[in-house]
Image: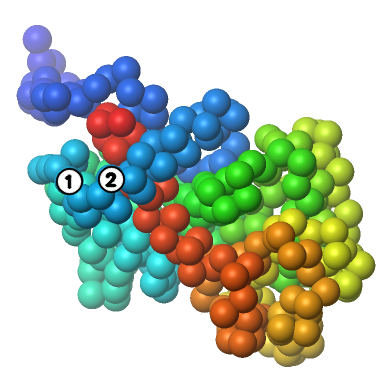
């Protein structure tokens, strides 16, 4: 019975808890789960994701598109610029027969009227089945997930993580070199602000690899991440010059200096041209190795390197489509 101080209105039961749409497989791994950090994956999870991604690749090559996610809707919510991440999520959803609400210009949405991230997320989940979020603030994906009943996929939270990029990076290494165990992997460039290398180093710590970090002294890998990787028993070495490790490197992962994250533009100017990969540099690398970059590249890899078969960065973008198809199918209970 309602008393004077208790409202008698109760929302209908069906809106109080999450109801499962007909046909979703509740037992599917990752069904209804958020993808926020690579820390949430086990090595078995990774094997499973890559198997599904591999199947997605075969299907796309064979039939182009198919209706696995027919009727499902993705909200692509981007508060920061993006070419590859945004368009590959759209392509992934559409190749699986689903559709997309693209919010890439938050300046045309109510965000410019001062709407909070939790409110925007609660709005979009009223219309969509899954939300992909890119945001300039570290921790924003976790914040969004606290409010969301539908899966949130972190597409980059400031200098924090970029888990789907790390998954596609690892998938690229597997598809190109056959396996990850036993490799010497060198991460180069802006290791301080680059979120892709933060997620990648964490993910690689699940494999038997040797890691080398090459950066200007101002842009070293954060201690917090190095400690986590050390706990997994992975050898790590820091360098300022690439020449010290290039001849033994199997995967050279180059990053852009993250101009937008520097509080002092003078520091950016000091470090921006520190490394440039040219054909002369590649001449000192192994014959069997790959050169990767999450892109966009600015000056770090000269265009003359593009014709080198070891330059894997354009193939890497394509692998991203298959990994994102796999992730969408999984969180929506269809893989
Ligand atoms: C990266 C990002 O946004 O973190 N790009 C991407 O998603 N492929 C790397 C960058 O901006 O340098």
Furthest residue toward front: 287
Determine which quarter of the picture holds residue 279.
bottom right
Q: Is residue 126 above or below residue 262?
A: above
Disc 1 element: loop
Tell whether 71 sits left or right of 124: left
Q: CA distance from mark 1 to mark 2?
A: 8 Å
Mark 1 vs mark 2: in front = 2
Determine which quarter of the picture holds residue 246.
bottom right
The residue positioned 48% from the left and 43% from the top of the image is 36
Is there CB contact under 8 Å for labels 1 and 2?
yes
**Which labelled disc corresponds to residue 174?**
none
Viewer can see residue 89: yes
Label 1 vs 2, first from the N-terminus: 2
From the top left corner, tell me how far across and down residue 60 is, in percent.
28, 51
The residue closer to the viewer here, 268 or 302, is 302
The residue positioned 14% from the left and 43% from the top of the image is 67
For disc 1, does the CB lie below 8 Å from ligand 1? no
Q: What residue is pinned by disc 1?
A: 66
Task: Count numbered badges in the picture.
Answer: 2
Q: Is residue 133 above or below residue 27?
A: below
From the top left corner, tell me how far across and down residue 35 is, in percent.
44, 40
Q: What residue is pinned by disc 2?
A: 59
Q: Is residue 10 above or below residue 206?
A: above
The residue closer to the viewer here, 109 or 213, is 213
The residue positioned 59% from the left and 29% from the top of the image is 43
């Amino acid at each position: 019975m309602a008393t004077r101080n208790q409202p008698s209105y109760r929302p209908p039961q069906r809106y109080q808890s999450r109801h499962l749409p007909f046909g979703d497989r509740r037992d599917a791994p990752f069904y209804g789960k958020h993808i926020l950090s690579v820390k949430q994956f086990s090595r078995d999870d990774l094997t499973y994701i890559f198997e599904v991604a591999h199947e997605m690749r075969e299907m796309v090559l064979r039939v182009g598109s198919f209706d696995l996610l027919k009727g499902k809707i993705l909200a692509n919510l981007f508060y920061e610029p993006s070419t590859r991440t945004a368009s590959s999520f759209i392509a992934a959803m559409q190749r699986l027969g689903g559709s997309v609400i693209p919010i890439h210009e938050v300046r045309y949405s109510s965000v410019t009227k001062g709407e909070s991230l939790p409110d925007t997320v609660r709005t979009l989940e009223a219309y969509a089945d899954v939300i992909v979020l890119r945001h300039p603030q570290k921790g924003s994906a976790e914040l969004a997930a606290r409010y969301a009943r539908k899966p949130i996929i972190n597409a980059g939270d400031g200098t924090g993580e970029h888990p789907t990029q790390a998954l596609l990076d690892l998938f690229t290494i597997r598809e190109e070199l056959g396996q990850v165990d036993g490799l010497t992997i060198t991460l180069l460039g802006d290791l301080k602000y680059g979120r892709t290398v933060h997620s990648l180093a964490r993910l690689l710590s699940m494999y038997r690899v040797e890691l080398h970090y090459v950066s200007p002294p101002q842009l070293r890998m954060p201690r917090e991440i190095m400690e986590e990787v050390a706990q997994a028993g992975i050898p790590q070495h820091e360098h300022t010059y690439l020449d010290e490790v290039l001849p033994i490197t199997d995967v050279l992962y180059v990053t852009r200096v993250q101009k937008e994250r520097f509080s002092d533009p003078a520091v950016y100017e000091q470090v921006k041209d520190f490394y440039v990969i040219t054909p002369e540099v590649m001449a000192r690398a192994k014959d069997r190795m790959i050169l990767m970059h999450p892109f966009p590249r600015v000056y770090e890899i000269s265009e003359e390197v593009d014709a080198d078969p070891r330059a894997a960065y354009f193939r890497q973008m394509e692998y991203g489509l298959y990994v994102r198809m796999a992730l969408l199918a999984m969180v929506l209970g269809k893989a």
